[in-house]
Image: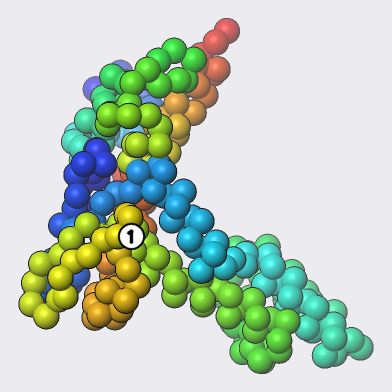
Amino acid sequence: MPPEGLKWSVAGQEWAENPRFILPAVWSEFVRMWGACRAGMGGVATWPDAGGLNDQAAWIVDAFARLANIDAALDRAARP
Amino acid sequence: MDPVFTRMAVERFTPPGCPRAYDLAPLTFRERQAFNADMARDGGMYPSRAQLLDAMRRVVRELAPSNAEPVIDIIDAAEADPDGNDRAVQEQISELEFRIAEQPAYANLVAARVHYAGMLPFIAARHALRGWEGPSLPPFVRIRGLVPDAVLELLPHAELRAIGERAAELMRVGPSAEGNSAPPSP
């Protein structure tokens, strides 16, 4: 739990409860998969499926891009 | 339904109350490009709400140039309320839509929307189907990555629609993924 009076913050959204216990576990696994595939500077080091960009499930390409955007926004916000 | 994590994971989809099951692929990036091209070719364009409202303004000015302004105000109010929260405005705009439904400048755009929405499930099924199983179905055929239209037309219409809608969901980030950042309580 966060300290008294504070909330969980995920991508700018505040949660009263730990989202890990509320969201279906499959989404945590998805974010973990993105973490395993990502490279620096918002890029992708490796894709989940064999082949290149064109060979990936299309929604995964979109979802990875969204996660990279959220991560970049958090990075910008955290930069002094 | 859980998301598929790989293009190799074909989903077995059963339309509600249906004894038949259909295998749907999530479509790869390349396959979705081909789907989008087919949509542009066979489904045409999906006019935006702004285009519809502009057409309404044109029709109103043409039909009633002397007293168009109060009606234009209703259209402006509807444009300012895209989520339909203002019930009074929505009722007024619905009545206006009904009154101008047969005016070609407006009707052509509505027809384009209906055509696009009608073609989408059909074209999505053409690209995403990988097989099927159940009574009263023809043998599954896929030629150069596509299920031929002549075969698709043998499927029950309501099922084809459900299959196509599910296939379209599988190729995009769905509401279950987008909405998962909404906090359940403040």
Tell me where residue B19 sits by quadrant: bottom left
Q: Nearer the viewer, residue B139 or A25?
A: B139
Secondary structure of residue under mark 1: loop
Q: Position of residue B112 (x, y in %)?
A: 58, 75
Task: State the image quarter where residue B41 is shown.
Answer: bottom right
**Among the 4 quarters of the image, the one containing residue B49:** bottom right
The disc labelled 1 sits on which kind of residue? Leu
Identified at 15% across, 70% down, the residue is B139
Please indicate whether residue B62 sits to the left or right of residue B43 in the image: right
- Residue B96 visible at all: no
Which subunit holds the residue at mark 1?
A: B
Q: What percent of the width, then of the height, locates residue B140? A: 18, 66
Asked if B147 appears above or below B112 in the picture, the reply is above
Q: In this figure, which residue is indicated by the disc labeled 1?
A: B146
**Residue found 24% across the figure and 38% down from its top:** B5
The crowd level at tag 1 (other Cα within 10 Å; few <14, some 14-19, many 20+) is some
- Res. B171 visible in picture: yes
* Quarter containing the C terminus of chain B: top left
Residue nearest the viewer, comparing B92 with B16: B16
Count of numbered tags:
1
The picture places residue A41, in percent across and down from the top left corner, at: 49, 15
Considering only vertical position in the picture, is A79 above or below B45? above
Report whether B83 appears left or right of B74.
Answer: left
Residue B90, given in percent of the width and then of the height, sits at 59, 76
B102 left or right, relative to B43: right
Q: Of residues B114 and B40, which is closer to you in this image?
A: B40
Q: Residue furthest right?
A: B66
At x 33%, y 55%, the residue is B144
Question: Residue, x 35% and y 36% (percent of image)?
Answer: A55
